Image: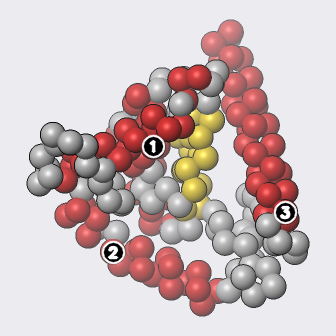
Amino acid sequence: GGRERERRVGRERRNNYFQFFLKFLKLILIALGYNNTPTLFTMKTVKINSKTKDRIIHYFEGAGMDYYAWSKSFNMHFGYYRWGMNPFNREALLNQMNEEVLRRLELEKIVDPLVLDLGCGLGTISRYMARKNPEAHFYALTITPWQVTYGKELTDEADLSERICHLEADLYCYSNGR
C-alpha cells in the first residue's frame, strides 16, 4: 500500500543521493590528482594491489574479536575526553567520540539525511547515530567480509536494518602508484 510505496520512493531517493555522492567524490579525487581513478562504486570491486588488500583483510579478520575486549559495542576508535568525565570509563569515552562526530555532522539540519560510513568496521558508529536520528539512513562500507557479516547481525539485533545497509567495498583507489 501507501506505506510500502513511501519506503520504495525513499530507498530510490537515497540511492540517487548515494550515486550523486560517489560521482562528487570521484571529481574531488580527480581534482586532487588521482586522474586515473576507476569508476567508484557501481558496486563493482575497484582494482587495487591484491597483496595490500589481503593484508588489510587478514589484519581485521584476526583482530576482529579483540575489539570486543576494547569495547563491548565494538567501537574501533579512541575515545574523547570531556572535562568531568571519568577517564577510566572507556565505553563512555568511546561513545563521547561518537557524540562529537554526530554533533559535527549536524544531521538534525538535513531532511532525510544519508550518511556514508567509509571504513565502518562493524558499523558501530552508524548504529549509534541511527538510534539518535530516526530519519537518517546509512551506508556502512568496509573491505572486510567478516565485518560486513557480523555488522549485519548486530544491526539486525538492534532492529536497524531498514536504515543501515552494510556493504563490502574497496575504497582504495590505485592510481599511478598511489
**Position of residue 171 in the picture relative to residue 71 (left or right):** right
Determine the CA span between mark 2 and mark 3: 35 Å
| Residue 91 on image: x %, y % | 21, 49
Q: Position of residue 69 (x, y in %)?
A: 20, 64
Q: Which mark is residue 63?
A: 2
Count how many numbered circles sit on residues in the image. Answer: 3
Q: Quadrant of residue 141?
A: bottom right
Point 62% across, 25% down: residue: 110
Q: Is residue 133 above or below residue 154?
A: above
Q: Residue at x 81, y 85 (%)?
A: 176
**Above or below: residue 63 compared with residue 131:** below
Q: Which mark is residue 31?
A: 3
Q: Which three-letter amino acid code belongs to the residue tagged 1? A: Val
Image x and y of residue 78, in percent: 32, 59
Q: Which residue has dot 1 on it?
A: 101
* Residue type, mark 3 in image: Ala
Q: Nearer the viewer, residue 111 or 14?
A: 111
